[in-house]
Amino acid sequence: MTSNTIAPNPWMILPFVLLLGAIALAPLLARDWWARHYPKIALGVGAVTLAYYLFVLRAPDRVLEVAHDYVCFIVLIGSLFVVSGGIHIRVKGEATPPVNVVFLFIGAVLANVLGTTGASMLLIRPWIRMNKYRVTAHHVVFFIFVVANVGGCLTPIGDPPLFLGYLQGIPFWWVAKQCWPMWLTGVGLLLAMFYIVDRRNFARAPREIRGMETAHETWQFDGLPNLFFLAVILGAVFVRKPVFLREGIMAAAALGSYFTTARGVHEANRFHFHPLQEVAILFIGIFATMIPALDWLELNARSLLGAHPAPGVFLFGTGLLSSVLDNAPTYLSFLSALFGTSGAKEIGELIRGETLNLAAISIGAVFLGAATYIGNGPNFMVKAIADHEKVHTPTFPGFVLKFTLPFLMPVLLAVWWIFFRV
């Protein structure tokens, strides 16, 4: 984000809208067709925007800036994906509601270290096995709420939007310092709601199943040497110069993890690269097509939002768009809008003068990335694994009507009332 933002033709935002609409609707309406053709669509619309910036606006520096952000983003996501795929958790015994609450809380903490993608891929199968005698939709949805989204709002590693903010210059520990009360409130309320729902589910289970579920749980961890590679990745986050040294260290750690992990661990995790491949290809298109949207929004934010929007505008605006679009580009869009409304020229000035609004954007993107299956990358991954394990998962409308509106939206309203009602 700079004060020398280029003014694109507003029509060039259309490829961005079309791509995000395709990501949202095509898997629901034409899954097989989308699975075959999404690379062509993502790369095609991305190429249109890049050609416009290179040959019409003659702005190669802007393209290189976004390309750098993309490489940094995908290397972090990919390295955490590979390392978490080398750690396998085996669980024997069944889980009572209190044990489930503790498990989800641990997942919320781990999401800030492994990322929401890494924590979700590491924990979803043990979660299903723990609850196998009574697992149902609420187990899957609250896992998405807590582990795949809300839990990861304390570090830039936790959720992709926050890492993009870190790449823009927001200090690593800024989110934890500013957002830990919101994190504690959000996670606490969701866990309390989950306990009530899960307690009722447990009470309805047959007596013999309840007897099984009070049995002692035993845990076994395989692939623990990968904790070393995880530590390397976390340390590399703080490396800033020279360019791409950080990404080189992360990639080396991922390669070391992949080639030293026992084959049996990968097989137990059913590890493969298809989810990472899909994310990498789609985000090439997203990062490319979002350039004119970000530039236009930064230039026109003041006329759209007013001179001094309240924090609630940024909280609910970011949140609602994150629920129907991917939360990473939505975060960047509202960060651009905040530059526009504040008149800040650089990120340090923005942090000093717009702390509450910047926190609202962070919370809105992370919390309501959980509102639908398309709000955040791990959501669909969790659903796909649950479907493969024959677990009942809600439909897209059912997810919103049965879980997002009655459970997640009250949490966001409570967070707004307590922290952002200015």
Image (tube, rainbow, N blue to C red):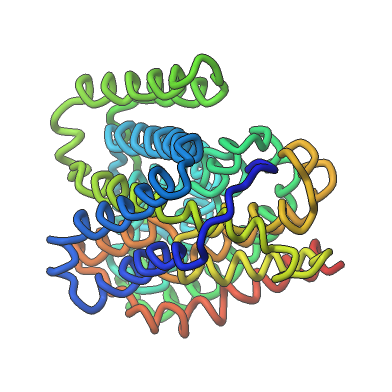
Q: Say if 62 sits above or below 290 in the image.
A: above
Relative image position of residue 339 (x, y in whole percent): 71, 51
Nearer to the camera, 56 or 189:
56
Relative image position of residue 227 (x, y in whole percent): 40, 25
Relative image position of residue 178 (x, y in whole percent): 75, 46
Q: Say if 57 sits above or below 379 in the image.
A: above
For the C terminus, the image quarter is: bottom right
The number of callouts visible is: 0
Identity of the residue drawn at 33% across and 62% down: 380
Identity of the residue drawn at 31% across and 74% down: 25
For the N terminus, the image quarter is: top right
Identity of the residue drawn at 40% across and 43% down: 54
User: Which corner quadrant of the image does residue 148 belong to?
Assistant: bottom left
Q: Is residue 93 visible?
A: no
Q: Say if 142 sits above or below 229 in the image.
A: below
Is 283 left or right of 155, judged from the image as shown?
left
Is 99 left or right of 154, judged from the image as shown?
left
Relative image position of residue 256 (x, y in whole percent): 27, 19
Nearer to the camera, 73 or 291:
291
Q: Residue furthest top?
A: 242
Q: Is residue 402 visible?
A: yes
Identity of the residue drawn at 67% across and 63% down: 300
Nearer to the camera, 382 or 20:
20
Is 166 left or right of 66, judged from the image as shown?
right
User: Which corner quadrant of the image does residue 269 belong to?
Assistant: top left
